[in-house]
Amino acid sequence: MPETADARASALCPAIAPQLTATVGRAFLNVRDAAEYLGLSPHTLYVWRHRRQGPPSFRMGRRGRVMYRLEALDAWVREQEQADSRSNTTLSPLNAAPQARPDYETSA
């Protein structure tokens, strides 16, 4: 028997299960809901949007409400994980070979 979104959300974290199941059924989130989904403040999303940073957003409807696609938020989080050297070992400076400086002389 397939597991429902409610059951999966309750298993993950009972405290946020009602909020999570409400967002699972929606394809678009407003700024407040997107901020909650990402664990950020709405102000941070507004600042990032103004600076053209952060997850992609768009205006929807006559009133031009700022909206975020749930899929785009998930993709943006994956991009952030891959860009971080702690999550992506190929970017870690600890795994790189030491580089010699051509203009640096060692004293004996």
Image (cartoon, rainbow, N blue to C red):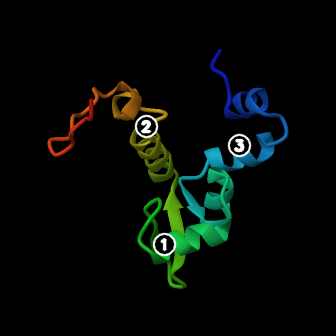
Circle 3 packing at 10 Å, graded few (<14), some (14-19), many (20+), is: some
Residue 99 visible:
yes
Q: How far apart are marks 2 and 3 (CA)?
A: 32 Å
Q: Which residue is drawn at 65% across and 14% down?
A: 1
Residues marked 1 and 3 touching at CB (< 8 Å): no
Whichever of callouts 2 and 3 sits on the residue coming sooner in the sequence is: 3
Q: In the image shown, does 62 or 54 lie closer to the viewer?
A: 54
Circle 1 packing at 10 Å, graded few (<14), some (14-19), many (20+), is: some
Residue mark closest to the camera, 1 vs 3? 1
Whichever of callouts 2 and 1 sits on the residue coming sooner in the sequence is: 1
Residue mark closest to the camera, 2 vs 3? 2
| Callout 2: SS | loop
In the rendering, at what x and y percent does residue 80 appear? 45, 46
Is residue 54 rendered to the left or right of residue 31?
A: left
Q: Quadrant of the C terminus?
A: top left
Whichever of callouts 1 and 3 sits on the residue coming sooner in the sequence is: 3
Residue 18 - label = none
Q: Which residue is drawn at 36% across and 25% down?
A: 95
The residue to which callout 1 is attached is 49
In the rendering, at what x and y percent does residue 30 appear? 60, 66
Residue 60 visible:
no
The residue to which callout 2 is attached is 85
| Callout 1: SS | helix
**Outermost residue to the bottom:** 63
Picture quadrant of residue 88: top left
In the rendering, at what x and y percent does residue 43 appear? 64, 72
The residue to which callout 3 is attached is 21
**Outermost residue to the right:** 15
Q: Which residue is drawn at 45% across and 50% down?
A: 76
The amino acid pointed to by label 2 is Ser
The amino acid pointed to by label 3 is Thr
